[in-house]
Amino acid sequence: MPLAATAQATPSATSLIADYISVNGNNTIIASGNVEVLHGTTLMRAQRIQYTEDGQLLVIEGPIYLVDGEDTVFIADSATLSKDLTNGVMRSARLVLNQQLQIAAAEINRVDGRFVELTKTTASSCEVCAKNPVPLWQIRAKRIIHDQEERQLYFEGAQFQVLNVPVMYFPRLRLPDPSVKRSTGFLTPKFRNTDRLGNGIKAPYFIAIGDSRDLTLEPYLTSTGAKSLSARYRQAFKNGMVQVEGALSHDNLVTEDIRGYLFANGNFDIGRDFELTFDLERVTDRAYLADYGLPTKDRLDSEISIARTKPVEHVDAGLIYFESLRTNEENELIPTVVASANYHKRYHPEWIGGQANLKFEGLGYLRQSNNDIAGRDVIRATAFADWNTSHRFSNGMIGAMSAYGAVDFYHVFQDSTFSNSITRPHGAASVELRWPFEKISGRANHMIEPIVQLVYAASSGPSVPNEDATQIDFDEGNLFAFSRFPGADQVEYGPSLNTGITYTRRDIAGWSASVTMGRIFSPQDFGQFGSLTGLNSRKSDWVFAAQAETAWGLQLANRMLFDDRLEFAKNELRLSINTDRLQLTSGYIWIEADPSQSLPDDTSEFSLSSSYEFRPDWYASTSWNYDFTASRASKSGIGLQYRNECVTIDLSVARSYSSSTSTDPSTDIGLSVGLNGFGGGSKKTKNRRNCTG
C-alpha cells in the first residue's frame, strides 16, 4: 500500500497508520515507517509492526513510544503486545509517570491494562543525561509493580541511593505515583533544633479517610526527652468544612506534666443564604506555641458567628471569647466575652436621590473581674441612618452632601464613674467640593484634585465608656470622615473644615505616582484627642501620603503626620518588590510616645522579609525585625532552599528574642528533605537542569 496508508475497522477497534502497510502470503499485516497504532486513549508510535498470523499480537520494533492516557508514557527498544496494547512485554524499556518519575527496566510486562510489572529497575525523578550522568537520588529494585487503577508503586528488594552511594535498603516499599494528590503514608520528615528543646525529628503520617476526610499524625521526639504528638483532622461536607488540629506534649520546660494546644475552625451553609462560621483557640500556657514552632499569637480568640450578605442587605451575629497570652495583660481586666449583632440595609430613595443606609447594632462586653471600674461590663445598642449624594457640575466640579443621625443606648455595670443607663443621640452633616484638573501629555496623564469639606456636628454629648476607640490613627483614609475615632464608642464633636489636595501621575511606560496632603481646621479644641494624635488643636497636623508603583513590580508608600515646625508624630515607609526572582517587603515606622494611647515609649521599628532566586533552583530568604528604641532585634531569620525536578531541600534558622508572650530568647533551626516525583508532594518546577550535549 502507498505512503500514509491506513487500515481501520470499527470505531472500537484498533487503528493503524503507517508509511507502508503490506500483507504477505500468510495474510500477516506488516506496517513500517512512522507507524502509529491507536486504541481508545492509547497511542503507540514505532518503526515497524508485524501482526501474528492469528492477528491477536503485535511484534514491534523500536524505538517505541507508547502513551497511555495523560500521565503514562512507555519507551522501549522492542515489544510484543496484544492488539489492544493492554497486555504484553516491552524490552529495554522505560516508564515515565506524570512527566516526573522515570523508571528504567530490563523488561516491562503489561497485564490487562492495569498492572505494569518492571524487572531490574532504576527509579528516579532526576534528569539524567550526558551532562548529568548520575542522578542525585535513585531507587534500584529487583521488581516494581505499578497499579494504574490504584495509582500505587510496589517495590521489591529496593535500595535507596544518593549519588550512586547506597543509603538504605527496603525489602518491600509502597509509594504513590506522581498523579496521586492524597494517599496514606509518611510525609517528608522534618529535623528541628532549638535552644529550649534540643535536637528533634518530626515524622508526619498522613491517613486518607475517603475522598472527603483525612487525618495527619505527627510524633515529635527531641534529645532533651521532650515527647509530642500532634494531629490534624479535616473533613469536607456538601455544605461546609471543618478542621481540627492540636497536640499533647511532655517536656521539662514547665512544671505541668502535659502541655498542648487545640485549634479548630469551620464554616457551613445552613440555608437561606446564611453561613455559620466558628473557630476555637486554646493553649495550656503562654510559651507553648513558640516552643514547638507553631504560629505564635499573643491573643487567642474563639468565635462562633452567623451571617448573611445580599446585594443591599447584611445581617450577622456572633460571640467571641478572648484570652490574652501577653505577659503585661491580666485576662480578668480585659473584655474576654464579646457578643454582637448587626443589621445593615442599603436604599436608593427616588424622592431625594443618592444612597441611604439603615443600621442596627448591638454589642456587649464582659470582664471576669467583679471589681468596680476595673471589672466594667457594657451593653450597647445603636440605631443609625445616613444619606449621601453627589453631583458633577458642567465646569467639572464634583459636589457631595452627606448626613447621618444615630442614637446609642448604653447599660453599664460595675463602674461607678458612669450612670447605669446612658442615652447618647448624635449626628453630623457635611458639604464637600472637589475640582479635578487633568492634563494629558504625550507620555503621561496628570491630575490635580483639591478637596474641601465642611462638617457640622454637635459640640458636646454625654460621656460613655470607651472600649473600641482607644487607638487613633489619623491619615489620608479618615481625613474626610465624620470622625477620626476607629470605633463607635467615641464620636467627634464640633464643626470642622477638612481640606486636602491630591496629585496623580500615570506614565505611558506603566508606572504611576500619587501624593495626598491635607489638614483639618476647627473653631476650637474640644479636648477629645491626646496631645500626640495630631488632632488636639484648632489646626491639625499635616497628613501626607505618597505612593509610587512601577510596571516591573516596585511599590513604595510613605505616610507622615507632622506639624508646622516639621516635627513628626508619625512616619511610616513601606517598600515592596515583586518580580519573577525577587519578592521583598520592607518597612520602617516611627510613632512618638503617647501615654494617652497606651504608648509609653517611642516606636521605631524596621522590618524586612525577602525571597530571592539567586541561581536556578536556589532560593534564599531573610526576615528581620529591629527595634531601634530597645536597640535590639525582635526577631530574625534566614532560609536556604534548593528545589529542582527531583528534590526539595529546606534549611532555616530563626532567632526570636523576648516578646509579649515570652522573656526567653530562642534559636530554631529546621531542615527538611523531600523527594519530588511521588504523590501529592510532587512538583513540576519551572527549572529543569539543562541536559544538552
Image (cartoon, rainbow, N blue to C red):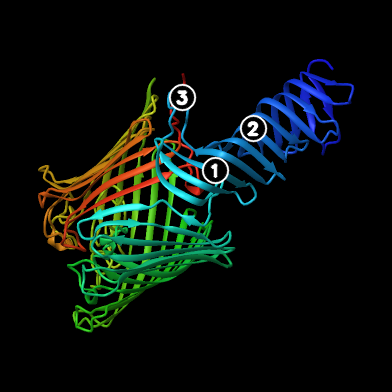
Disc on res. 211: none
> SS at mark 1?
strand
633 relative to 362 in the view: left or right: left
Looking at the picture, does residue 234 appear above or below residue 380? above
Residue 8, by quadrant, is top right
Amino acid tagged 3: Cys
How many other residues sit within 10 Å of disc 1, few (<14), some (14-19) or many (≥20)? some
Q: Report the quarter where the N terminus lies.
A: top right
Residue 158 spot, x, y in % from top left: 49, 46
Q: Give the CA separation, mark 1 to mark 2.
A: 16 Å
Residue placed at 12% from the left, 42% from the top?
Answer: 566
Q: Which residue is mark 1?
A: 142
Nearer to the camera, 483 or 239: 239
> SS at mark 2?
strand
**For the residues bearing labels 1 and 2, Cβ distance under 8 angstroms:** no
Residue 637 spot, x, y in % from top left: 24, 46
Amino acid tagged 2: Arg
Nearer to the camera, 180 or 238: 180
Disc 3 versus disc 1: nearer the observer:
1
Q: Which residue is mark 3?
A: 691
Residue 156 spot, x, y in % from top left: 54, 48
Amino acid tagged 1: Lys
